[in-house]
Image (cartoon, helix red, strand yellow):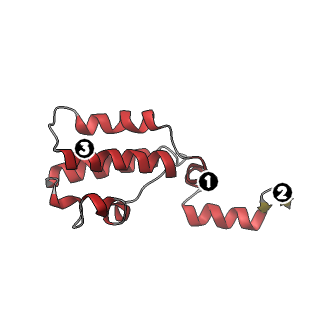
Amino acid sequence: MESGIGTEAEINRAKANSGGFGLFLRSLTGLDRQAVAAAFSKFQAGKTFTSAQLRFVNEMIDYFAHNGTMTVDIMYQPPFTVIIPAGPEEIFHETDMEAMITTMHSINATAVPA
């Protein structure tokens, strides 16, 4: 079956490559920056971050807003390595890393049907 954006096979391949239809759509549309910032506000609650930590978290929020999803490996690539060349462990404690990754997975999970 042909559609305006590609064949059904092409659409199915794109969905499979992106992890499902919800994640595929997110990769096209991104996310509302305020919604992503709200999700990360729980991670930031009650903590005092350095300027580098704040830049890193804001870069994550911007990345989600633009791309719709994010995986852990992205934190070890530009533009994140411009802020912290050795990776986020250089400036975040292990518990903060775990909370940040949990937040990331939670945001990604909202695009996956139950």
* Residue 85 vertical position relative to residue 96 in the rendered view, above or below: below
Label 2 secondary element: strand
* Residue 101 vertical position relative to residue 13 in the rendered view, above or below: above
Q: Can you name the residue that lies furthest to the right here?
A: 1
Three-letter amino acid code at disc 2? Ser
Residue occupying image coordinates x 45% and y 38%: 33
Three-letter amino acid code at disc 3? Leu
Residue at mark 1: 21
Residue 27: quadrant of the picture: bottom right
In-image side of 113 versus 93 (left or right): right
Residue at mark 3: 54
On the image, the x and y values in percent for residue 90 come to 16, 60
Between 97 and 51, the one lying in front of the other is 51
In-image side of 15 versus 114 (left or right): right
On the image, the x and y values in percent for residue 23 come to 55, 53
Depth check, mark 1 against mark 2: the one in front is 2
Give the mark, 3 or 1, whose residue is nearer the N terminus.
1
Residue at mark 2: 3
* Residue 38 vertical position relative to residue 75 in the rendered view, above or below: above
Three-letter amino acid code at disc 1? Phe
Between 6 and 58, the one lying in front of the other is 58
Contact (Cβ within 8 Å) of mark 2 with mark 3: no
Is disc 1 surrounded by few (<14), some (14 to 19) or many (20+) residues within 10 Å? some
Between 90 and 102, the one lying in front of the other is 90
Q: CA gap, disc 2 to disc 3?
A: 44 Å
Label 1 secondary element: helix
Give the mark, 2 or 3, whose residue is nearer the N terminus.
2
In-image side of 107 versus 82 (left or right): right
Q: CA gap, disc 1 to disc 2?
A: 16 Å
